[in-house]
Image (spheres, grey):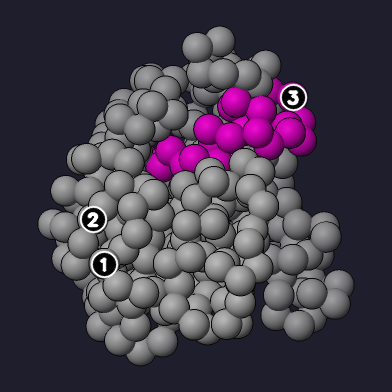
Amino acid sequence: MAGNGTELAWAVETPGPMDTRPLRPVRRAVPLPGPGEVRVRVEACGVCRTDLHLAEGDLAPHRPGTVPGHEVVGTVDMTGPSATRFAIGDRIGIAWLRHTCGTCRYCRAGRENLCPYSAYTGWDADGGFAGHAVVPEDFAYALPGDVPAEGLAPLLCAGIIGFRALRRGELPPGGRLGIYGFGASAHLTAQIALAQGATVHVMTRAESARRLALTLGAASARDTYDPPPEPLDSAIVFAPVGDIVPPALAALDRGGTLALAGIHLTDIPSLDYQRHLFFERQVRSVTANTREDGEEFLRTAREIGLKATVSPYPMDRADRALADLAADRVRGAAVLTTG
């Protein structure tokens, strides 16, 4: 749908390595909201590793020329027909999950993240690497107006997915959690686990990320493939690297659980049953999230005073932000701001 005027947006034209510049600036018509939808004027949009996977072709494009970005904070500036949940001027968030059928057996069982007919912001529809974005109102989140937009943006995917991964990891009260990779999602998840009384050990390759982990309260911070100083009750792999899975499993205590948090993972090497899986160790994947996950996480984040460490970039440097993410040059979460 076209709106009045045009604006700058960033689109993935031909997926490929970042040095081929898969993310390009384009002029596009300002979108209009359809029935049951609202439009926001974008204040900030987080840069997620999923955006990088889309740009580099790890995720097959669902449509040509998609505008990435699914951690969108904005102010409602237009409502579509029959949209009544939000008013003009309300601040809302647009996240990864943007549609489910509501009728399949997964949706009826409260597992809408597994809906075969689900659709996603920045993959099936244009996202927030732009001046405006449109979302079905039932899949938007009400956000507080007293928090800077750049601090809220990473919560809308990195935070929500980390929250679900923590649950999937079945960390017991006061348990020992291992975190592999320490970017946007991991540094938020660590804060939740610490607030719940867990001991957190971080394994990641970037020295700056290890320093951040210790600053936030991690008991230890080591290189990616170094063993933690004690057996783990639970571990989460955030880095999209399958080679990490065997050492993460080997680090688990008996009965421990490993959660794989990413939408993409390189091939996992062969596992040794006795060393990696015996004694009832288990591996669990994480697939998107439910809206209930999102609402509960945002309540939890507010209650514990969760703080996102942010590396801001102006919207017109989205390509630089994505390249820095690919090269592990981002501390915490990269966020595009519109000023």
- From the top left corner, tell me how far across and down residue 288 is, in percent: 62, 60
Give the distance between the C-alpha atoms of the residues marked 2 and 1, in whole angstroms. Answer: 10 Å
Q: How many residues crowd mark 3 within 10 Å: few (<14), some (14–19), many (20+)? A: few
**Residue 102 vs residue 10: left or right?**
right
Residue at the spot of label 2: 221
Q: Which residues are magenta?
A: 42-65
Q: Residue at x 73, y 32 (%)?
A: 61
Name the element at disc 1.
Answer: loop
Q: Quadrant of the N terminus?
A: top right
- From the top left corner, tell me how far across and down residue 35 is, in percent: 73, 53
Closest to the camera, between mark 2 and mark 1, is 1
Could you tell me how many numbered marks the image carries? 3
**Residue 151 vs residue 321: left or right?**
left
Q: Earlier in the sequence, mark 2 or mark 3?
A: 3
Query: What amino acid is found at the position of numbered circle 3 in the picture?
Result: Pro
Name the element at disc 2.
Answer: strand
